[in-house]
Amino acid sequence: MSDSTPIPTPSVTPPDILRCASMELQVTDLAASREFYVDVLGLVVTEEDENTVYLRSMEEFIHHNLILRQGDVAAVAAFSYRVRSPEDLDRAEAYYTALGCRVERDRSGFVKGVGDSVRVEDPLGFPYEFFHDVDHVDRLAWRYDLYTPGALVRLDHFNQVTPDVPKAEKYLEGLGFRVTEAIRDDEGTTYAAWMRRKPTVHDTAMTGGDGPRMHHIAFATHEKHNILAICDKLGALRRSDAIERGPGRHGVSNAFYLYLRDPDGHRVEIYTQDYYTGDPDNPVVVWDVHDNQRRDWWGNPVVPSWYTEASLVLDLDGNPVPLSERTDASELEETIGADGFSYTRRDETEESMPEWKKGEYKLGHQL
Amino acid sequence: MSDSTPIPTPSVTPPDILRCASMELQVTDLAASREFYVDVLGLVVTEEDENTVYLRSMEEFIHHNLILRQGDVAAVAAFSYRVRSPEDLDRAEAYYTALGCRVERDRSGFVKGVGDSVRVEDPLGFPYEFFHDVDHVDRLAWRYDLYTPGALVRLDHFNQVTPDVPKAEKYLEGLGFRVTEAIRDDEGTTYAAWMRRKPTVHDTAMTGGDGPRMHHIAFATHEKHNILAICDKLGALRRSDAIERGPGRHGVSNAFYLYLRDPDGHRVEIYTQDYYTGDPDNPVVVWDVHDNQRRDWWGNPVVPSWYTEASLVLDLDGNPVPLSERTDASELEETIGADGFSYTRRDETEESMPEWKKGEYKLGHQL
Amino acid sequence: MSDSTPIPTPSVTPPDILRCASMELQVTDLAASREFYVDVLGLVVTEEDENTVYLRSMEEFIHHNLILRQGDVAAVAAFSYRVRSPEDLDRAEAYYTALGCRVERDRSGFVKGVGDSVRVEDPLGFPYEFFHDVDHVDRLAWRYDLYTPGALVRLDHFNQVTPDVPKAEKYLEGLGFRVTEAIRDDEGTTYAAWMRRKPTVHDTAMTGGDGPRMHHIAFATHEKHNILAICDKLGALRRSDAIERGPGRHGVSNAFYLYLRDPDGHRVEIYTQDYYTGDPDNPVVVWDVHDNQRRDWWGNPVVPSWYTEASLVLDLDGNPVPLSERTDASELEETIGADGFSYTRRDETEESMPEWKKGEYKLGHQL
Amino acid sequence: MSDSTPIPTPSVTPPDILRCASMELQVTDLAASREFYVDVLGLVVTEEDENTVYLRSMEEFIHHNLILRQGDVAAVAAFSYRVRSPEDLDRAEAYYTALGCRVERDRSGFVKGVGDSVRVEDPLGFPYEFFHDVDHVDRLAWRYDLYTPGALVRLDHFNQVTPDVPKAEKYLEGLGFRVTEAIRDDEGTTYAAWMRRKPTVHDTAMTGGDGPRMHHIAFATHEKHNILAICDKLGALRRSDAIERGPGRHGVSNAFYLYLRDPDGHRVEIYTQDYYTGDPDNPVVVWDVHDNQRRDWWGNPVVPSWYTEASLVLDLDGNPVPLSERTDASELEETIGADGFSYTRRDETEESMPEWKKGEYKLGHQL
């Protein structure tokens, strides 16, 4: 069960986080994963060896945004953030030490391409990493000869599953994150919150559920047609079952999205066109959990697996972190199925619908 | 029950049909329908009176592509085709007379904007209309000051529900249509067939089911983002429940699509980018009914209402035509639900999937 | 000088032409041309040998749309049309024989992939070819794993330079073509005409100038961003000087366009989104030669080379056909430069413009 | 003539600037300007009176991004930046006072919608404004029912003309801006520099020329097709002469662009898709002034007016600021015309081109 004790905010200065920068994914079949991320999705290989592939997006100038590492279990080894200065690593070390967390520091970097790094088991159980020094590589933004129809141009965000979202919000606010959007209900339950450092809707989101788990990692494309091209290609490869949900328009974030599952089931979002959030008084958008357009602006149903499945995370010894159960209400149960409900218009009822809309019309009404 | 007697092909010359040109829709709340087609979808009003609205698409130069007419029951009054010459109306009259059908001719036109017209109750029970003379109106193709983000530029096709698809194919081939694509199974059942006069994938399609009914009318946009813009607008209007299925990429036709339901439940497809089919030896594409990418190239599930619901059609007296039941296998039952199955790759089985793909992953496996 | 004698219309039935289907281009450096059309533009190689490359577009099912053949001089060896039936070759042979043209027939085809073919030196001096039998190859429309960001999906049209456009119009009308759009002036001069068999704006256009020459061959993309992607790629390859004009929106045809020059200077248009023209009373659009939006809807200037340069054509012995001079007014001279003028609004004058628009503002006013 | 004395960097802390936020434009015909920005471009009116219109973009939540104010002369009254906190206004006041500039402060705001504000005549002669307090208004990001095909979603940047670019760079670096890209030559001349606070390519750019003048203000769209739609609409309105340059792809910034001129000749850029620059070690991209792809990645020519024309700016009394001449080399003269040159490939010469590329081919070679 989830520990509801609030996480204290240390009095020491937190590190100045620039942005989500990379994820280290443990995969069970490196060749299959490489094929998915490189041959299908078109990420660029910066460097690789027998056990590891370092990948980046087209507009990136740092060494990598994604590391695939061969392992026995599909899991996330690190959520990695870049900080503003070398001194921010000292701050990270002090901050998490003050939080009572396990902290490891490797001045030559835990992985290739980065220097001095701090890894922690954070208060929510996630393996967070911080680094500043990094090898610069070619920013391929202008290399249109290398673009594919579905080119991924930036790492956009992480999404984490944790039992107690308000607790997670408070912890990240202590680290300097700000909430941009959230899903709540009238009873005061928070189902998910989106939090940012860079001025987009998020660098990470906290999604309510048994955790710690990794819900997804998201890469950005330039335009919506790039996302459609990825779907078309998966169809042509007879791998359309890699498409879990979408494409669609999010309510939250206003972005256009697609969710894929990689060969291990790790979820990858392809994402484009959210909005600028960099002002300190940027309006927070709160969505009602029963609003059927909150997660898909077009009211298309969210598949149950999207709510229930997520990736394990590893502790600093490389062992999967055991899960704590969510005790708050479940978004899945609140909104779909026999006891849940969602509305398109706030005051509508089943009775107010025309006859032909009742019954089996629209999966959103029946799942 | 459906009458399986084949329809004889008359020995007289059929009319030379140019293209599907217009549909006359009976609607039960004209103001609501006008608001949907004009204010939401952006069709252009050519002319209107208290009971009738004549609409056209942005690139059209004939008087209308859609007529909305107030009536007591939601139904289709005419599927209207344009023929090459005035003489083709004599041919239409003779052809359907030879078929033993009820035929009406009005030399001043049954509706505004067109002249000499022939209406028939065709052998499948559908109200077909043929005309040549028509009022020309401004082709608004260059009027970008009038375009909306989701502008509808052409009427693309009709789609009809009929119990016996091979019978319908043979009838339309007699009329000069050619099959471009079809869904069949290894046992010889045909589930649907796409048939064209103009060199696109279809002017009409025949979908197996209780009939005669109108499955949908389809308008084309220039690009895919126009279709996404329609979805976004429906979300903004809190009318996302008008979206029944999609957007997505069709397997059949290779077009990008969206299905909407108008205020009466009449289904409207928004469609873009199929391919040229005008050569006489244009290869016919046959899809296996169990191929999960046939109706959505991305493997996204077809909602049951899309299979089961359709609009009534009217006879020439304005009365709804009673339905005949389909006796062949149902595509819905063959492909989804407890007894149906669909595959992404022809030889795959549930057992060959990774653990995380079993169970409730992907609605396509469970509905 | 151009021969102004009208071309008589033979009394025999012309062949039933389906569409422009292929061009045979003689190139002086086959490797360079192959690299341009295959590696840069992404056309698909159906077959090749030491001296010849057969190429097709993504949605094509016939053997080729473009033949590159090594030769001593850059020129066009054939404008090739597909006809409806084998018997139409007899008609083509009889038709051009009646016209007094040189006619050659090769029942095994002049090139690979096609059967019985007729080649003529037409009354305007162009090498026209007609064929029906053709090898079918895979239509790659659904092979999104092979699409590039700028994928060419169809051959759309040819464009020919000839001194006397009305004479050419009449000749093509005899062959069954119809005019869809034209550029004329108030004095009765015709500068260009667009003519179609398939129901698009054209299968070929006639452009006034010294001829016979080939102005360009045009391939279609699905959407406008595909055309922009070609420009971006050329920039990345440091081959932006292959871009001669555009991208832009045509006034004539309403299509989005780009003009490239291949390594021999042969002009290739990339084109998307004109409109349906298949009705017999399709309204003809006539543009005033002084309308500055006729060739670019956005008023961007047409570069002089676009008017003056074009490719030689070969006679049936493979020798370049000598040019006849245009004697009618030149569109270039009428519209730009010291003595020409173009307007954005029909009645505007230089004097009516604000001060800052005079002088060197907008190249369209000064070239 | 330009004063080459360096601008000292004050020892006091500069204000923490969030982003370029608004421009106040003086216009000579308010109705005409309103029609251009509202009816043609679709900016949203937040508030207006007889002499002033306050406009914002679709994703904005502050009161305005553009103010149109009736006046006698076309000029810019303020380049307005938002700062992080109210205290940053004290810092702004102190900073410019230390610089010896004229400084005005209005605690109730110089314009509607904002509170406490500082206006200065900066060391380069520009009217800069800083504010923090601002009225929040509806962020219309989700209001797709209000989007036009060319919807402007954000204010992206300013562009200023100043004689001495390195001097301007140093001044803005003192204010906390960072250079992201620049155009220089091998002799050490700087022709332009792009500088940012928010993590895009710029909040403002400094372009070498007689100054102080305003080169342009830029708004962002979501996608490239939105920019094309603006061109199409201007064509339909017979206002294509409002298009000065583009659309095209920039080399600098990698963004897709279009330059318009408003009824007073004020230049407006429409811009989309540059890249993230927020890391402190973000690689600076330096372009050679002779690189023909630096300002248009496709090598399309820059029209002379784009180099030579720009808007006056006003001092704090509302009088036009006299211009100082640029004494460094002119980009226009270095790159086009009789004495300038540009290359597509660094080592190419006129002689190395094929015959057909010489002479009048490509305006870039001849203007």
Image: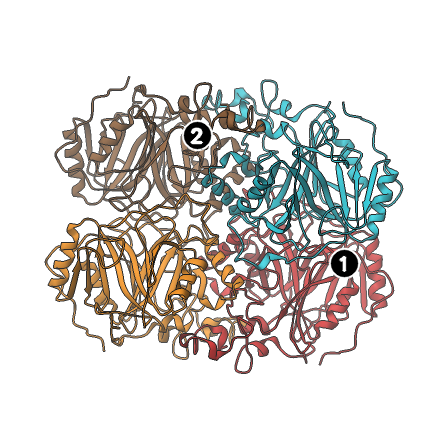
Chain colours: A brown, B cyan, C red, D orange
Comparing D197 with C79, the one in front is D197
Depth check: give the residue in front, B244 or D343: B244
Q: Secondary structure at mark 2?
A: loop
Label 1 and label 2 in one chain: no
Say if B353 sits above or below B128 in the image.
Answer: above
- The answer to whether residue C52 shows anywhere in this view is no
Classify mark 1: residues with Cα within 10 Å, few (<14), some (14-19) or many (20+): many
Q: Quadrant of the C terminus of chain B?
A: top right
Q: In this picture, is C307 found above or below A326?
A: below
Label drawn at residue C277:
none
**Amino acid on which disc 1 is placed:** Phe
Which residue is drawn at the image coordinates 76% and 43% (left, top)?
A: B129
Residue B236 picture quarter = top left
**Which residue is identified by label 1?**
C130
Residue A76 x, y percent position in the rendering: 33, 29
Residue B39: give x, y in percent of width and height: 53, 46
In the rendered image, residue D230, in percent from the top left (x then y), is placed at: 47, 58
Q: Which residue is mark 2?
A: A347
Task: For marks 1 and 2, give the CA distance.
Answer: 66 Å
**Residue shown at the point (36%, 70%) measured from the top left:** D28
Seen in the picture, residue A83 relative to A188 is either above or below; the reply is below
Q: For mark 1, name the chain.
A: C
Any part of residue B34 in sight: yes
Q: With D155 as the anchor, is A88 left or right in this view?
A: left
Q: Quadrant of the N terminus of chain B?
A: top right
User: Is residue A19 found left or right of C223 in the rendered image?
Assistant: left
Secondary element under disc 1, as helix, strand or loop, is: strand
- In front here: B298 or C46? B298
Tell which tag, 1 or 2, sits nearer the viewer. Answer: 2
* Quadrant in the rendering for residue A118: top left
Residue D53, how many percent across, how many down? 34, 59
Q: Chain of mark 2?
A: A
